[in-house]
Amino acid sequence: MPCADITDILQLRIGHDNRIAKYWLRKRSCGGVAGERSLIFDWLGSKSADGIADMPVNEFLSAFPIADEVHEYLLLKHFFAVQSGIRILLGKETGRPDDFCAVEAIEYHPEGVDLLAHLRIEAITDQIQACNRCSNCSTH
């Protein structure tokens, strides 16, 4: 029987150069992944954390050929998760327990700053549906 817990875990490290050093997105319950664990990591490597934090969703999506709706959903899920994690580390979001990206831990690491957060997938799904890939999105 499938697990009823759809919460994801985001692990994110911003290096001292203000770039994403690594990130993973996986299910809290079983550690399983949807798509790839670090689906957009290669794309992230060339961007600053500040640039990703303020990037409009259309700019992000224009970098990827979209195969189908599932692929688009997975790309957006990873983007919004990483973007929110960065925004929390930059003080632009709170990361409270009732936010869709809720902080569990922030730690200094010799290679940068690590964030561990829980993601309420239903909230990310609502954000993706509200986004609708239009240019009028006020939050992204």
Image (spheres, helix red, strand yellow):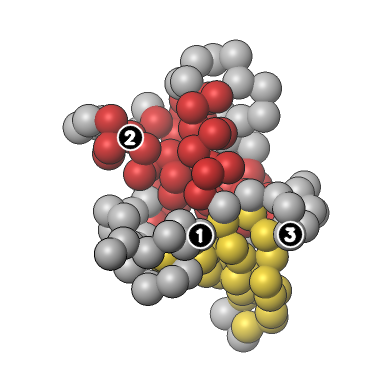
Question: Residue 30 at x, y = what percent?
Answer: 37, 73
Q: Are marks 3 and 1 in contact (CB under 8 Å)?
A: no
| Extreme residue toward the left, this view | 67
**What residue is rendered at 53% in x and 25% in y?**
131
Q: Residues within 10 Å of mark 2 (few under 14, many from 20)?
A: some
| In front of the other: 97 or 136 | 97
Residue 114: image location, x then y, percent: 61, 73
Q: In which quadrant of the rendered image does the C terminus lie?
A: top right
Mark toward the start of the polypeptide (3 vs 1): 1
- Using the image as rendered, state which of residue 40 and residue 70 is in the foreground: 70
Residue annotated with mark 3? 97
Q: Would you say 43 lies left or right of 118 here? A: left
- Residue type, label 2: Glu
Q: Dot 1 corresponds to which residue?
A: 7
Mark 2 = which residue?
72
* Crowd rating for badge 1 (residues with CA inside 10 Å; few <14, some 14–19, many 20+): some
| CA separation in Å, label 3 and label 2 | 27 Å
Is residue 103 visible to the viewer in this orientation of the structure? yes
The label nearer to you, 1 versus 2, is: 1
- Residue extending farthest to the front is 1
Which residue shows up at 43% across the image and 60% down it? Answer: 4
The mark that comes first in sequence, 1 or 2, is 1
- Residue 125's tag is none
Residue type at mark 3: give it. Answer: Pro
Residues under labels 1 and 2: Cα distance? 19 Å
Mark 3 vs mark 1, CA separation in Å: 12 Å
Picture residue at 69% right of the left edge, 80% below the top: 108
